[in-house]
């Protein structure tokens, strides 16, 4: 039997059920009915995901918005067993994530926590499900189903880009693999297909097209995107492809000025951290498609990746990447953590100076940035969703680099993210209403401070929560006739309302 002692009960149960599936069917039917009666609502109860009519956002079939909040759990299928996978996905759900991006295979063949290989004889999957063996794809099935129980979509990166670059999959193999993947997962409700994997789209483009088109020819129910190399966007190569539903970019992990010798550097020097510019660039392509940052700087990873003596990106940095991107017009955002993305643990360290003894993945789930992303999602879903646009004319002075202010608005509300807490002059006349209620939101915990009511004119604001040690925040202004946020609300969260702080502000 191919199971270790820690998981022998899982294996024994699996063998019993496989060998006696019809005997146990009535019991499973009763259990399934019992669970379904009390099951919590799931996102896909609103129908399948699709692109919004204006081409900028994602939504469900019933019209409700879907704000993508992802985590990069790249090595989840390879590194975690069933209990660990369930714990990780549960923690993601509790932190507000609704997508986990994984490397379906990270090698040819890939090997998982049970010692099982993703393929045994080339790219032939005809005999991959062996009787009596809890195989690689059985474990992948479990992860997909476990994620579904927690209300999470699996962003399935089919194969990491470096493998294709290295010649480990050609066009015919891509078609074979695409048929296998689509056939196995087309009926799962919580799949998003991700082609590529940290690679430029002009490297073996024919392989990516073959893989994507094959999957789409079988599975028309799930959205598809392409995960590109750092400082590039999928729109550069694939925006006109029918198989590409929305664009993804990787703003990457480099600090301002860290060019580091790229011969094909697609952005101006000194803009390495300006994640908002990738969103701006996406709107220049037609047809218009939604876009999001699928890999920004990771919490706990060295700036620039390749020198362990460099400072590590912090929660403040990951918040900046998130708010800059979303306020520039992204349809969501993906967080990353150096320890979590490769699931390091004591005795198992990883790339980019991740230390499994110092910061194992299950401790990194308590890192501040991991828990702070939820407030961005909750904030965006408070307001009318589909008319939101980026609008920097709200601001008299956007600023540069870390001083940059970034604004987004709907018809009757506006939001401005301020990374450094500097003074900002806001044109309140950009939204409806003679009077505007104004708040400051702390992005670390969603706390609100009511700043008062103002006329429709340009107003200068500068505000810090005394003693908090938090420099960044979001200014919120709403037409006073609207009640998206009650004046007495203390926090952006999933629960209720409480007394709110009111502060006088000098204009």
Image (cartoon, helix red, strand yellow):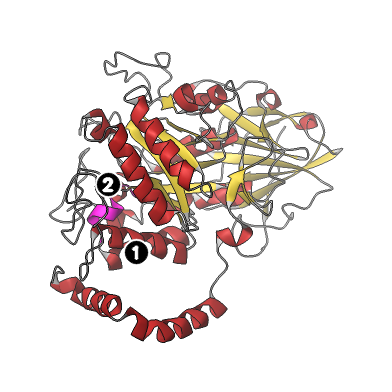
Q: Residue at x 18, y 75 (%)?
A: 8
Q: In this figure, which residue is indicated by the disc labeled 1?
A: 142
Q: In this figure, which residue is indicated by the disc labeled 2?
A: 105
Badge 1 marks a residue whose secondary structure is helix
Earlier-in-chain disc, 2 versus 1: 2
Q: Is residue 461 magenta?
A: no
In-image side of 339 versus 461 (left or right):
left
Q: Can you name the residue that lies furthest to the right here?
A: 434
Give coordinates of residue 204: x percent, y percent: 32, 25
Distance from the alpha carbon under mark 2 to that under mark 1: 15 Å
Give coordinates of residue 490: x percent, y percent: 64, 57
Give coordinates of residue 481: x percent, y percent: 84, 48
Disc tally is 2
In-image side of 228 versus 392 (left or right):
left
- From what the image shows, is residue 105 above or below residue 360? above
- The answer to which quarter of the image holds residue 279 is top right
Q: Residue at x 23, y 55 (%)?
A: 79
> In the image, which residues are magenta?
72-80
Q: Quadrant of the C terminus?
A: top right
Quick one: 9 or 79, which is closer to the camera? 9
């Amino acid at each position: 039997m191919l199971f270790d002692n820690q998981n022998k009960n899982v294996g024994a149960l699996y063998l019993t059920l496989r060998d006696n599936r019809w005997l146990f069917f009535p019991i499973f039917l009763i259990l399934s009915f019992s669970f379904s009666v009390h099951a919590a609502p799931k996102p896909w109860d609103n129908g399948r995901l699709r692109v919004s009519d204006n081409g900028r956002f994602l939504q469900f079939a019933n019209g409700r918005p879907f704000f993508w909040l992802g985590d990069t759990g790249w090595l989840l299928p390879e590194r975690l067993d069933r209990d660990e996978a369930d714990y990780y996905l549960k923690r993601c759900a509790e932190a507000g994530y609704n997508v986990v991006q994984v490397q379906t295979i990270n090698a040819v063949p890939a090997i998982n926590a049970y010692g099982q290989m993703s393929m045994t004889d080339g790219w032939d999957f005809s005999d991959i499900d062996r009787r009596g063996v809890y195989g690689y794809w059985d474990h992948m099935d479990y992860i997909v189903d476990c994620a579904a129980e927690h209300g999470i979509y699996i962003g399935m990166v089919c194969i990491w880009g470096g493998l294709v670059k290295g010649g480990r999959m050609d066009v015919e193999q891509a078609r074979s693999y695409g048929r296998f993947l689509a056939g196995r997962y087309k009926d799962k409700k919580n799949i998003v297909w991700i082609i590529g994997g940290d690679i430029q789209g002009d490297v073996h483009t024919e392989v990516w097209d073959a893989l994507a088109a094959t999957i789409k020819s079988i599975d028309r129910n799930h959205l598809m995107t392409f995960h590109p190399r750092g400082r590039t966007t999928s729109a550069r190569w694939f925006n006109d492809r029918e198989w590409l539903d929305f664009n993804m970019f990787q703003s990457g992990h480099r600090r301002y000025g860290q060019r580091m010798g790229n011969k094909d550097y697609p952005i101006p020097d000194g803009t390495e951290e300006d994640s908002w510019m990738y969103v701006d660039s996406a709107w220049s392509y037609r047809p218009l498609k939604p876009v999001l940052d699928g890999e920004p700087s990771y919490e706990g990873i060295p700036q620039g990746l390749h020198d362990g003596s460099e400072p590590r990106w912090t929660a403040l940095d990951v918040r900046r990447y998130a708010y800059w991107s979303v306020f520039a017009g992204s349809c969501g955002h993906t967080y990353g953590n150096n320890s979590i993305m490769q699931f390091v643990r004591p005795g198992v360290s990883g790339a980019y100076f991740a230390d499994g003894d110092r910061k194992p993945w299950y401790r990194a789930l308590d890192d501040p940035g991991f828990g702070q992303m939820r407030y961005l999602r909750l904030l965006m879903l408070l307001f009318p969703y589909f008319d939101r646009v980026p609008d920097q004319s709200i601001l008299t002075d956007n600023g540069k680099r870390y001083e940059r202010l970034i604004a987004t608005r709907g018809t009757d509300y506006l939001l401005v993210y301020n990374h450094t807490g500097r003074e900002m002059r806001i044109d309140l006349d950009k939204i409806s209403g003679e009077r505007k209620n104004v708040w400051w939101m702390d992005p670390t915990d969603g706390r609100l401070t009511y700043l008062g009511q103002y006329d429709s004119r340009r107003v200068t604001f500068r505000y810090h929560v005394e003693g908090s040690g938090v420099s960044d925040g979001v200014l919120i202004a709403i037409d006073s006739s609207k009640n998206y946020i009650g004046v007495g609300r203390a926090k952006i969260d999933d629960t209720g309302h409480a007394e709110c702080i009111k502060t006088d502000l000098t204009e």
